[in-house]
Each structure stands twice: as C-alpha cells, then as structure tokens.
Amino acid sequence: RSLEGDPGRRLLARIAEDSGCDPTAAIDMTPEYVKGILEPLGMLDHPIVFISDHQDPTILDRLKNDATIGSKLVYVPDEDSWVGGDMTLAIMANVFIGNPASTFSGFIAKSRLALGWNNSFMFRRKNEDGRWEDVCDDNCIFNKKVMHAMA
C-alpha cells in the first residue's frame, strides 16, 4: 500500500480534518518540516536517521540535498533494512517524526508513549507565525475520533 500516493493523501487529509494537522506535511516530509521540529529541540547537530519504505525516493533526495540536514543524514540501505530493526531504531530514538496516516508510524508512536517517552511528532501544523506546532498531544494517536479504525 502506498502512503505517498492518492490513498495516503486521502487518509492523511481525513486525519487532518479531525485533528487539525497539516494535510500533506507528514507525507511530503520536506527539509523545512523536519528542521521545524528538530531545530527548537537543539537536535540539528545530531545524526538524523532516515527510515522509509522508499516508495517515494524524492523525499530522501530532498533531505540529502538540504544544506543543513544533508550532512547529518544516515539511512539504512534497502538490502540492510528489516522491519523489526527499523521499528526498534525508531522506538528508541530521541525524536521520532512520523506520518499519522501510517500504521507503521502509529505503532512506533504508541510504543514510545507506552514506554513513557515523548518527542514523537505526528500531528503538526504551521501557526500564524509560520512555525510548526503540535495540534494534538501524544495521546491523539489513540483517539478514535481522529484515528478512526487505526486508533
């Protein structure tokens, strides 16, 4: 199932309508979006591990070509990627940036919450000042009115 195509965009749009998050940012995963999360946390000086199903290689290309993010980016090549390893890496990360329309991201965010960890960024939108902000707390991932059957 492709979350980067029309089905994923429709699902994220529905979640955005119910949560108030941006309807495309979590799928597009632009450098601006990633930096808008990491910079206020002081995490732009640390390695950024990219985990993906590689359905949309333009996401990785954009991040690699960004002057701030590119040199910090670490990614697991397809031949070395394993779903269990990718999940473990994401669950144990200092910061997790995920897509609320992805069941994979949802599982990671729920696991992090169960372990008592915050810094899972799933439901974001730009405020009036042009800065990215959370629109739901971490428990939003369990909210049936927002996540529907994925809660």
Image (cartoon, rainbow, N blue to C red):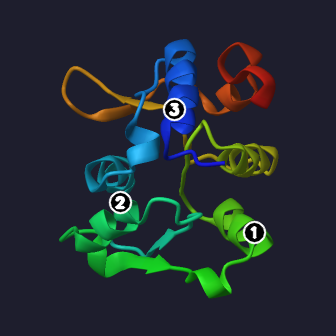
Q: In this view, which residue lies farthest toward the bottom?
A: 79
What is the three-letter code of the residue carrying label 2? Gly
From the viewer's side, name the closer residue of 105 and 61: 61
Q: Is residue 92 visible?
A: yes
Residue 146 vertical position relative to residue 86 in the rendered view, above or below = above
Q: In the picture, which quadrant includes the C terminus?
A: top right
Which circle, 2 or 1, is nearer the viewer? 1
Q: CA distance from mark 3 to mark 1?
A: 23 Å
From the viewer's side, name the closer residue of 59 and 6: 6
Q: Where residue 36 sits: x, y (%)? A: 31, 47
Q: Where residue 16 sits: x, y (%)? A: 50, 22
Disc 2 and disc 3 in contact, CB within 8 angstroms: no
Question: Which badge, 3 or 1, is on the more N-terminal residue?
Answer: 1
User: Which type of secondary structure does the marked residue at label 2 adopt?
Assistant: loop
Which residue is at 71% across, 51% downward?
Answer: 104
Is 64 situated left or right of 66 in this image?
right
Q: Which residue is mark 3?
A: 123
Q: Is residue 43 visible?
A: no
Q: Which residue is mark 2?
A: 42
Which residue is at 64% across, 33% downward?
Answer: 138
User: Which type of secondary structure does the marked residue at label 1 adopt?
Assistant: helix
Q: Where residue 84 sits: x, y (%)? A: 80, 70
Q: Which residue is mark 1?
A: 83
Q: How dense is the environment of label 1, judged by Cα within 10 Å: few (below 14), some, or many (20 and up)?
A: few
